[in-house]
Image (cartoon, grey):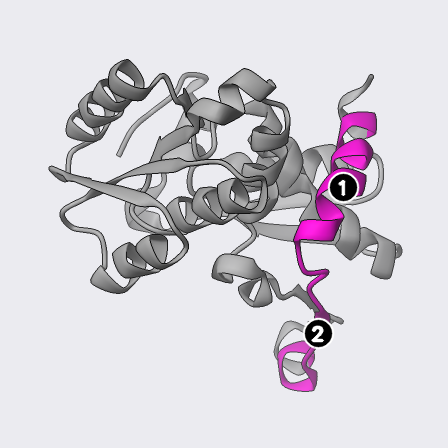
Amino acid sequence: MTLYEALLDCHRHISPFIHRTPVLTSRSVDAMAGCQVYFKCENFQKGGAYKIRGALNACRQLTSGQKQKGVTTHSSGNFAQALTLAARSLGMKAYIVMPSSAPAVKVEAVKGYGGEVIICGPSLREREEASARILADTGATFIHPSNDLQVIIGQGTATLELLEEVPELDALFCPVGGGGLIAGACIAAEGKCAVYGGEPFAVDDAYRSLQSGRIESN
């Protein structure tokens, strides 16, 4: 199965659990840009972001034994909510490591969705150590917010839907954080349109990584 075939298969399986979010336009933005702009509004997705797509795809790949032990991740908000929602949809337990710096509203949202929240220090090392303790204690499966092929494929379904509605798209502009969204977008858009990533000047690790040929950090 090719990556694109896996993307189509993923979309068939997760569609019952997600919203097909609208594609909207704005005359004001079109006038400023000098072209027609389409917005894939994943802010209307369950959990408020596209990330439930990847979380669902990763969770559905697990064996029955793995599902019984649950899943875990570390996240300051969006993926934490997404994985908790995905786990609940599939009847699984979710153990979510969140840094002490995470917004209180997102911590409460994860709890409201049924996740067990473990608060840790704000550094990546502290998140990883807390996740390792959960793995040792529960046997849960760790799912990375972005560096996971099944998560990437799931995130690509947002672009798949966009291209189904706007097949004549010339270019896709995608925000870059962990990289899962743009990687999935490239799978969906290959041979159809150009894909451009954007990130803040002060947090430009993806740009510097492409320039140097190795993974850079902020």
Q: Is residue 10 magenta?
A: yes
Residue 92 as seen in the image, left or right of residue 16: left
Q: Identify the residue position indicated by label 1 in the image.
A: 11
When asked about the image quadrant of residue 44, the answer is bottom right
Q: Is residue 124 magenta?
A: no
When asked about the image quadrant of residue 164, the answer is bottom right
Label ID, residue 24: 2
Mark 1 lies on a secondary structure that is helix
**Could you tell me how many numbered marks the image carries?**
2
The residue range painted magenta reads 5-30
Q: Residues within 10 Å of mark 1 (few under 14, many from 20)?
A: many
Amino acid of disc 2: Leu
Residue pictured at 63% horizontal, 30% vertical: 60
Residue 150 place in picture, x, y as percent:
61, 27
Residue 6 as seen in the image, left or right of residue 58: right
- Quadrant placement of the C terminus: top left
- Quadrant placement of the N terminus: top right
Residue pictured at 67% horizontal, 40% vertical: 156
Magenta region, main secondary structure: helix
